[in-house]
Image (cartoon, rainbow, N blue to C red):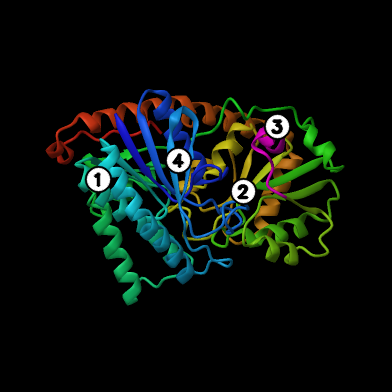
C-alpha cells in the first residue's frame, strides 16, 4: 500500500498535530506501507520558521523507515491574527500543490491522507488523489471554521462566515473517509453533510510507554528547576491565542495566599510574552521553555494538578492533544469547560471542571484537589486508567491501519455504503 500524507505540521516539530501526523506515517511505514509526506517548513509553536530552515525553498528529508518528506515554504505571521492565519494556510496549500501533484504522478499512491488544520490545503490533497486515481481520507484535528466563530475571528452571519461554511461543507463531502478525534466531534460530521458511512473516529493517543506515573514530589525535574513548594499546578503546551490561556496568571494570583503551590507554564508560542507581562509581580508563577521529549515524563510527573484552559464555545470543537499525556501521567486535570461538552466528558471523573474564563473558579478547583489527597489520588488513578483504556497508541494505530487497508481495497463506489468504523470510546 502506498500512502501520500499532506499536512502542514510534521517532524521536526515535536508538539501538537505534528506528533500525531508523524506517528501515523512512521507506524504505516513500520507495517510495510510505502509512505511519502508533503509538509511545511517547521514553524510551530513559535510561529517562526526554525533556524536552519529559513528561505523560500522546498527542502527534502528522509525520515525513519525510508519516509520521503518534502517541506514546502509558507508565510508565517509573527502575530497570527485571523486574516493572517488564512494567508498562512493558503500559502502552504499553494506551495504544496505542485509537489503533491508531482508525487501523485510519480509515487502513484493508493490513498492520499490530508490533515486539518489546515482545511485550506485539503483541496491540494484531493486534487493529487484525483490525478493518481487514489482514495481520499481527511483527518480533522479541530473544526477551524467553528473555532473561528467561537473566538470571534469570524462572524457566522457575515459574507466571510457563510463562505467559510460553504467551503468547509464542500471539502468534507469530497473525501472517501473523514475522521476526527472524539465521539462528539464525530457526531458533527453528518451535520456538515458527511455520510455516516464515511466517518471514522481516530483518536489522538497517549504515549503510554514514554509517560509513566511517578510518586508525587519525586520528579527529578522539580529539584533541578529549584521549585521548593510542596505542590505544582502545571500547564504544558503551545501558548496560542485561542486557547483561553489568559486565565493562567489569574489562577496563580488566586493561589498566591497559600505559599505551598507554584503555577508552572511550560511552552512556546505567540502568547508567551503577553502572559509573562500579565504575570509580572506574581511570585508563585514560573515560565519554562519547551522541554525535550526525553523529559516529557519528568515534566508531567512534576505536576500535582494539570491545568487545561479552554475558551467558552470551543470545548465541543477541539479536544486538546495535550490532554492525552496529562491523563497518562496519572495526575488529575482541572479544565475550564462546561459539563457535557467534548472536553468536559473526557475530564469528568479524571479531574474537575471550572467555568471557562473564570480564573477564581479554576483556582478553587485546584485548591480542592490539593487539600483532598484521597480525591487527588483517586482522580489521578482514573486518569491513568482512561489513558490505558481509551488512548493507547498501539491499539489506536492498529485499528487505523486496518481501516486504511479496507479503504484502499474497497472499490471506489463502496464509500457511500461502507459500514461506519470508529474507535471505541
Q: Quadrant of residue 180?
A: top left
Q: Quadrant of residue 112?
A: top left
Judge by depth and name the residue closer to the eye, 346 or 66.
Answer: 66
Q: Label 2: which residue?
A: 237
> Mark 3 near mark 1, Cβ–Cβ under 8 Å?
no
Q: Residues within 10 Å of mark 2 (few under 14, many from 20)?
A: many
Mark 2 vs mark 3, foreground winner is 2
Alpha carbon of mark 1 to alpha carbon of mark 2: how far?
Answer: 34 Å
Q: Is residue 298 located in the magenta-colored stretch of the structure?
A: yes
Q: Label 4: which residue?
A: 21
Farthest-out residue, left = 413
Q: Label 1: which residue?
A: 129
Please tell me which of labels 4 and 1 falls first in the chain: 4
Q: Position of residue 126 (x, y in %)?
A: 26, 50
Q: Residue at x 53, y 53 (%)?
A: 337
Residue 313 vs 142, above or below: the answer is below
Q: Secondary structure at mark 1?
A: helix
Q: Residue at x 64, y 37 (%)?
A: 293
Amino acid at each position: 500500500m502506498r500512502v501520500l500524507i499532506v499536512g502542514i505540521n510534521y517532524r521536526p516539530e515535536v508538539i501538537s498535530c505534528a506528533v500525531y501526523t508523524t506517528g501515523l506515517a512512521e507506524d504505516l511505514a513500520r507495517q510495510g506501507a510505502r509512505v511519502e509526506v508533503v509538509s511545511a517548513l517547521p514553524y510551530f509553536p513559535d510561529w517562526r520558521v526554525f533556524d536552519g530552515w529559513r528561505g523560500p525553498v522546498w527542502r527534502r528529508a528522509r525520515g525513519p523507515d525510508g519516509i520521503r518528506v518534502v517541506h514546502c515554504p509558507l508565510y508565517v505571521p509573527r502575530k497570527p491574527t485571523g486574516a493572517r492565519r488564512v494567508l498562512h494556510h493558503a500559502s502552504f496549500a499553494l506551495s504544496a500543490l505542485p509537489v503533491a501533484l508531482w508525487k501523485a504522478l510519480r509515487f502513484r499512491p493508493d490513498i492520499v491522507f490530508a490533515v486539518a488544520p489546515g482545511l485550506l490545503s485539503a483541496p491540494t490533497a484531493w486534487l493529487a488523489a484525483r490525478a493518481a486515481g487514489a482514495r481520499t481520507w481527511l483527518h480533522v484535528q479541530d473544526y477551524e471554521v467553528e473555532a473561528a466563530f467561537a473566538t470571534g475571528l469570524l462572524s457566522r452571519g457575515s459574507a466571510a462566515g457563510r463562505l467559510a461554511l460553504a467551503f468547509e461543507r464542500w471539502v468534507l463531502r469530497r473525501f472517501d473517509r473523514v475522521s476526527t478525534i472524539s465521539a462528539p466531534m464525530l457526531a458533527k460530521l453528518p451535520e456538515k453533510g458527511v455520510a455516516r458511512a464515511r466517518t471514522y473516529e481516530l483518536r489522538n493517543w497517549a504515549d503510554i510507554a514514554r509517560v509513566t506515573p511517578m510518586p508525587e514530589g519525586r520528579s527529578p525535574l522539580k529539584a533541578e528547576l529549584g521549585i521548593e513548594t510542596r505542590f505544582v499546578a502545571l500547564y504544558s503546551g503551545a501558548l496560542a491565542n485561542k486557547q483561553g490561556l489568559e486565565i493562567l496568571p489569574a489562577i496563580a494570583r488566586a493561589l498566591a495566599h497559600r505559599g505551598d503551590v507554584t503555577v508552572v507554564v511550560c511552552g512556546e508560542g505567540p502568547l508567551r510574552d503577553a502572559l509573562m507581562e500579565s504575570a509580572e509581580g506574581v511570585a508563585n508563577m514560573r515560565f519554562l521553555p519547551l522541554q525535550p521529549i526525553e523529559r516529557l515524563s519528568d515534566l508531567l510527573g512534576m505536576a500535582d494538578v494539570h491545568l487545561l484552559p479552554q475558551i467558552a464555545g470551543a470545548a465541543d470543537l477541539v479536544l486538546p492533544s495535550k490532554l492525552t499525556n496529562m491523563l497518562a501521567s496519572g495526575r488529575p486535570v482541572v479544565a475550564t469547560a462546561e459539563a457535557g461538552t467534548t472536553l468536559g466528558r473526557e475530564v469528568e471523573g479524571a479531574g474537575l471542571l471550572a467555568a471557562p474564563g473564570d480564573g477564581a473558579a479554576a483556582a478553587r478547583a485546584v485548591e480542592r484537589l490539593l487539600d483532598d489527597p484521597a480525591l487527588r489520588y483517586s482522580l489521578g488513578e482514573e486518569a491513568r486508567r482512561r489513558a490505558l483504556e481509551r488512548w493507547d497508541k498501539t491499539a489506536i494505530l492498529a485499528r487505523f491501519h486496518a481501516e486504511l487497508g479496507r479503504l484502499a481495497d474497497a472499490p471506489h463506489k463502496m464509500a457511500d455504503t461502507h459500514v461506519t468504523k470508529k474507535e471505541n470510546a
